[in-house]
Amino acid sequence: MFEQRRPGAVLFDRDGTLIRNVPYNGDPDRVEPMPGAVEALVRLRRAEVPVAVVTNQAGVARGLLTPDEMDQVNAKVEELLGPFDAWAICVHDDGDGCTCRKPAPGLLIRAAAVLDVSPRDCVVVGDIGRDMEAARAAGARGILVPTRETRQEEIQQAPEVADDLTEAVDRVLSDAQRGDTCQPAPAAAAGSALWTGLADWSRW
């Protein structure tokens, strides 16, 4: 039987999910919230559900933006969308062999540890297949919110699909929690912003 309960946390992808996707963006003036993002986050915070960002930012590894530019963009995200309880960011590229870059589960596991919840008690909301694969690898529930850039096969393979962030949050707050009863969380890591190697940051 599914258990009706509030999730331990909701972990959001950044680009294409919370804000408009601008590849390798280092300009905070180009940050624009996705439709419904502000309202969705307000609802989760009012329900006292922790919210975090889990994002690949390979543009740093590729030399397309600097860590400082990345920090400025993320500061703008919080200015527009409000504070997040944790950030987990991977600045590695696919060839770096890290365990944090989605579709690997490392970012999700670290964010859950900072929030002192089990990854299995988290919901991951993203716009591409990498987000859903990372959720599956971490044992978390995944909800895909497609955009025009989402491939059809990613939609077909997603465990759940929501039309927009409003519907995704409707499900988070009202649906039965998927999977087994949650297990105890690992020990929390120090700090609320996470860095592996050079950093830990979005989808690219």
Image: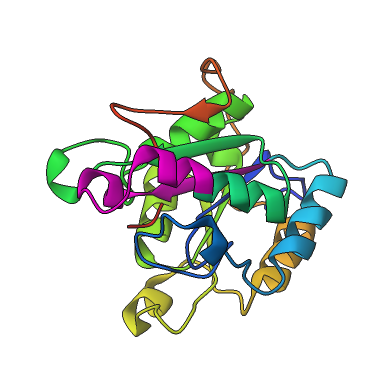
Is 201 positioned to the left or the right of 179 in the image?
Answer: left
Q: Name the spot of residue 80 as percent of width and height, x first.
A: 70, 56
Q: Name the spot of residue 179 as percent of width and height, x first.
A: 56, 48
Tally of numbered tags: 0
Q: Nearer the viewer, residue 95 or 78?
A: 78
Q: Name the spot of residue 70 as percent of width and height, x first.
A: 43, 45
- For residue 66: magenta? yes
Position above or below: 107 against 1: above
Residue 140 visible? The answer is no
- For residue 188: magenta? no
Q: Nearer the viewer, residue 62 or 38?
A: 62
Specify the segment rendered in magenta.
51-72
Q: Name the spot of residue 31 as percent of width and height, x first.
A: 56, 63
The quadrant holding residue 150 is bottom left
Q: Nearer the viewer, residue 119 or 90?
A: 90
Q: How is the image coloured?
A: rainbow
Position above or below: 181 against 30: above
Residue at the image point whose x is 42% and y is 59% from the top: 132
Q: Residue furthest right?
A: 46
Is 194 positioned to the left or the right of 37 in the image?
Answer: left
Residue at the image point whose x is 12% and y is 46% from the top: 95
Residue at the image point whose x is 42% and y is 68% from the top: 22
Position above or below: 171 against 188: below
Residue 102 visible? The answer is yes
Position of the C terminus by quadrant: bottom left
Residue at the image point whose x is 61% and y is 40% from the top: 121
Q: Nearer the viewer, residue 130 or 27?
A: 27
